[in-house]
Structure formats: structure tokens, C-alpha cells
Image (cartoon, rainbow, N blue to C red):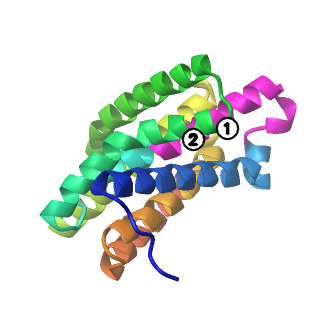
């Protein structure tokens, strides 16, 4: 197949942003339809309105995760491509709203989505600092922090902050005893994050390997505490 031809860099950025938010929506839908997630979230016992709210939280979490990924300071890429990623990050909310508009969503609801994305982005971006500090504290209790240890912590901050926030909103703040639901959300967001990160970094295996090891370690740590 021939690669797509773009009229301009703006056209390419719009097409890429559109593809990214489609990936976000697809990832959220896959999790929402997962039998185990539906059981853990007790979806069948909830009203349709509440189910829709939870699905929207899954979608916005995936969209915001992509935004956080595109601005991650430790992305391994050329300087000029980093500027392109910053442009992509700015287009992500608009691309998602455009897709909703194409599906016939009314203007009032589109404005609600714009506000929701902004609120969740500000929240999860702010929470990155607490997540990083907590991870560094936990890591330092087990062993002295190394450069490699710090890089692994930094690598996972966006997905962990997003998963924690998404879990909180899905549960309406009542998260006690719902650790398995958190793990399901974290696994789903981690898959999306790793796939996109490897693509952005040119398919290098080293960051992927490090990320997978760190995710598995974090999940084992959570299981040992339940």
C-alpha cells in the first residue's frame, strides 16, 4: 500500500490527531465491553444514564492519556519531532469533538465534552506530581533509587495518574474495596500507552521492555497488598 499523501503539515497533524482519538475511543470501548470489567463495575445493575457516564469517563481518560503522552519530557525522539508532538497534543481535544460532531452529537453536548476534557486534563496533569512522589517513596523503601529506577518511574507517571483519576470518577469516589476494578482500568490504559509510545519512539524495543517490566512490577506490588 502507498502511504497517504498530505497537502500540508497541518493536514498531516489533523489526520494523525484524528487517528489517535479513534484509538482512544476504541480502547475505551474494548474495556467497556470486557466481561470482567462489566462485572467489577457492576454495570448491569446500573441505569443506562450511569453506564453512559462511566463510558464517557473511560473515553476521556484515554484521550487525556494521549495528551499527557505527547507532552512527556522523557519521550525519545528528535527535537524537531517533539515540536510536532506538541502541535498534535493541542489538536487532540478538537479532534475528539469533531468526531462527535460527525456522529450527530448536538452542540450543547459538544461544549460539555470540551469542558470535561479540559477538567480531566488539568486534574490528571496536576496529579502527576503526587504520583511521581509516591512512586519514588515506595521505590526508595525497597532499594536505593538509581537513574534507571527514576526513569522507569517517570515512564509510568502519565498512565498511573490517569488510571487513578479514572478509577476515582468511575466509582464516584467510592473506591474502597475496588482494587480489582482499578487494575482492569490500569491494564487497559497501559496497553494503549505502550502501543502509542513505542510508535512515537520509532518502534525501539528498549523503552517497551522497560515499560512492560515496570508495569508488571507495579501490578505485582498492588496484588501483594490486597
Among all residues in the image, which is located at the extreme right?
45
Tell me if label 1 and label 2 are in contact, CB under 8 Å.
Answer: yes
Residue 210 lies left or right of residue 178; in this view the side is left
Near-viewer residue (96 or 152): 96
Q: Mark 2 = which residue?
A: 99
Residue 67 visible within the image? yes
> Gap between marks 1 and 2, in whole Å?
6 Å
Q: What element carries label 1?
A: loop
Check the image and name the residue furthest to the top: 108
- Whether residue 152 is situated above or below residue 111 in the rendered picture: below
Using the rendered view, name the quadrant where residue 118 is placed: top left
Q: Residue at x 34, y 66 (%)?
A: 200
Q: What stretch is highlighted in magenta?
A: 41-63
Task: Judge left or right: residue 212 versus residue 155.
Answer: right
Q: Say if the magenta span includes residue 35.
A: no
Residue that appears at 53% across and 83% down: 1
Vertical side of 54 occupied by 137: above or below: below
In front here: 158 or 13? 13
Give above or below for 175 relative to 64: above
Q: Nearer the viewer, residue 44 or 121?
A: 121
Q: In which quarter of the image is residue 102?
A: top right
Q: Is label 2 in a helix, a strand or a loop?
A: helix
Q: In which quarter of the image is residue 176?
A: top right
- Left or right: 91 as drawn, with respect to 117: left
Q: How crowded is mark 2: few (under 14 residues within 10 Å), some or many (20 or more)?
A: some
At a point 47% along the width and 26% down the height, the residue shown is: 114
Find residue 103 and name its label: 1
Amino acid at each position: 500500500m502507498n502511504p497517504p499523501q498530505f497537502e500540508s503539515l497541518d493536514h498531516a497533524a489533523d489526520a494523525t490527531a484524528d487517528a489517535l482519538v479513534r484509538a482512544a475511543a476504541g480502547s475505551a470501548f474494548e474495556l467497556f465491553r470486557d466481561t470482567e470489567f462489566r462485572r467489577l463495575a457492576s454495570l448491569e445493575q446500573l441505569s443506562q444514564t450511569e453506564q453512559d457516564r462511566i463510558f464517557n469517563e473511560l473515553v476521556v481518560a484515554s484521550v487525556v492519556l494521549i495528551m499527557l503522552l505527547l507532552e512527556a519530557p522523557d519521550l525519545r525522539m528528535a527535537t524537531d519531532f517533539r515540536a510536532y508532538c506538541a502541535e498534535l497534543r493541542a489538536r487532540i481535544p478538537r479532534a475528539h469533538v469533531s468526531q462527535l460532531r460527525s456522529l450527530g452529537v448536538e452542540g450543547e453536548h459538544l461544549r460539555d465534552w470540551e469542558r470535561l476534557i479540559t477538567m480531566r486534563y488539568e486534574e490528571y496533569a496536576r496529579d502527576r506530581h503526587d504520583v511521581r512522589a509516591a512512586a519514588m517513596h515506595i521505590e526508595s523503601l525497597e532499594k536505593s533509587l538509581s537513574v534507571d529506577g527514576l526513569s522507569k518511574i517517570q515512564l509510568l507517571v502519565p498512565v498511573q495518574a490517569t488510571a487513578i483519576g479514572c478509577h476515582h470518577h468511575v466509582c464516584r469516589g467510592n473506591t474502597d474495596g475496588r482494587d480489582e476494578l482499578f487494575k482492569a482500568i490500569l491494564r487497559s490504559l497501559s496497553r494503549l500507552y505502550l502501543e502509542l509510545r513505542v510508535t512515537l519512539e520509532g518502534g525501539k524495543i528498549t523503552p517497551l521492555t522497560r515499560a512492560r517490566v515496570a508495569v508488571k512490577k507495579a501490578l505485582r506490588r498492588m496484588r501483594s497488598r490486597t
